[in-house]
Every structure is written in structure tokens, then in C-alpha cells.
Image (cartoon, rainbow, N blue to C red):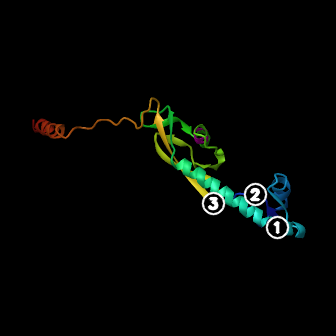
Amino acid sequence: MKLILREHVDHLGERGQVVDVARGYARNYLIPKGLAFEATPGNRKQLEQQRKVFEVKDAREVREAEEIAARMAELDLTVERRAGESGTLYGSVTNSDVAALLRARHVEVDRRRILLTDPIKAIGEYEIAVRLHPRVQGKVRLRVLGEGGVSAPAAEPGPRESEEPAAAAEADSEAAD
């Protein structure tokens, strides 16, 4: 079934594009949600008339997304979570957590737009991509700390250089006995 998209649909097409989809997808999802309408000759004429409106709206959305991306690039988000001695978190930091941190900084982003492939499960610094518009992607820095602001797991102190030769000489003398 041929449809004209009213809005951008991921993995399908851009606003104003004519696409061919399965009838069930069109009847049960795209048309009821107002994302598309049937591509009849009359609707195609309307599309040509509305193309200018779509272009202006799209340009405005891109500009707004670029402004949000610039604001996000300046942000350094920090979250504290309970962690083990090895730096592994007892829980995880998800895209919902990142969205809440951004919201606290007055940047409204839908959690589904935050591109975390897997939840964050370790202490460290991360750069997270956020799809603000199909053509604009922002990045935000996130620092995950342990409780109390611990930034890295405590490393075991190794032997000091001055102790190594003495320990080696002591081991040699014991082996000779």
C-alpha cells in the first residue's frame, strides 16, 4: 500500500516521502497514529502544495536540534551509584537515568532518543550519543562514580622499586642455603 508520511518514521522514511508498506502496518499503525495518509492522486497534489511547509518545518526542527546539541556538548553529567571494589556497579545506568539527568539540567530529551546499546555497568567516563533529529546527533559526557564520589576502583599497591632488588636478593640467599 502506498502512503505519504506526515512525520519521520525510523527505518521507513522522511516526512513527505511516498513509501510502500504492508496493508496491516498502514491500517493498524501508521494511519491511526497520524504518521501517514494514503497516497491518492488528490493527496499527492496536496503533498506538492505542502512540500514548502514541510521544508520550513524541517529546517526549524534541525535548527532547534542543533541548539540542543550545542547545549548538551557543554554539559558534564555525573551520577553516583553503589559499586564493588572492582568498579562494577551493583545496578546499572540506563537511558532513562540519562534522560532524568538531562531533564534536571533543563534539556528535555525522550529516553528513546538516547543511544545506549547496553546499560552502563562500571565506574568510568562515557560519551553518549543522542539522536535529536534524523540528521542531528548530539553527545553528552557522563561520569559514573561510586558512592561517596569514588571515581576509580582502588588499585592494590605493587612492590616499590626500592623493595624489589632487596626482595630478589633475599630470595637468592634463601635458595643458596
Q: Mark number for residue 159?
A: none
Q: Nearer the viewer, residue 141 or 82?
A: 141
| 100 falls in the magenta region | yes
Task: For marks 1 and 2, give the CA distance.
Answer: 16 Å
| Sequence-first disc among 3 and 1 | 1
Q: Which residue is mark 1?
A: 49
User: Magenta stretch?
Assistant: 98-102
Q: CA distance from mark 3 to mark 2?
A: 14 Å
Q: CA distance from mark 3 to mark 1?
A: 24 Å
Q: Is residue 78 magenta?
A: no
Say above or below: 115 vs 156.
Answer: below
Q: Residues within 10 Å of mark 1 (few under 14, many from 20)?
A: few
- Where's the N terminus, which quadrant? bottom right
> In the rendered view of the protein, which quadrant contains the C terminus?
top left
Question: On the picture, is 135 further left or further right than 30?
Answer: left
Q: Measuring 63% from the left and 60% from the top, which residue is drawn there?
A: 135
**Residue at 10% in and 37% down:** 173
Query: Mark 3 highlights which residue?
Result: 135
SS state under label 3: loop
Residue at numbered disc 2: 7
| First in sequence: mark 1 vs mark 2 | 2
Q: Position of residue 60 (x, y in %)?
A: 68, 57
Residue 49 pos. (x, y %): 82, 67
Q: Which quadrant of the view contains residue 42?
A: bottom right
Question: Can residue 23 be spotted in the picture?
Answer: yes
Q: In front here: 26 or 74?
A: 74
Give the quarter of the image for residue 150: top left
**Amino acid type assigned to the residue bearing label 2 in the image:** Glu
The amino acid at mark 3 is Arg
In the picture provided, is 45 more to the left or to the right than 172?
right
Direction from residue 60 to residue 98 in the image, left or right:
left
Q: Is residue 128 visible?
A: no
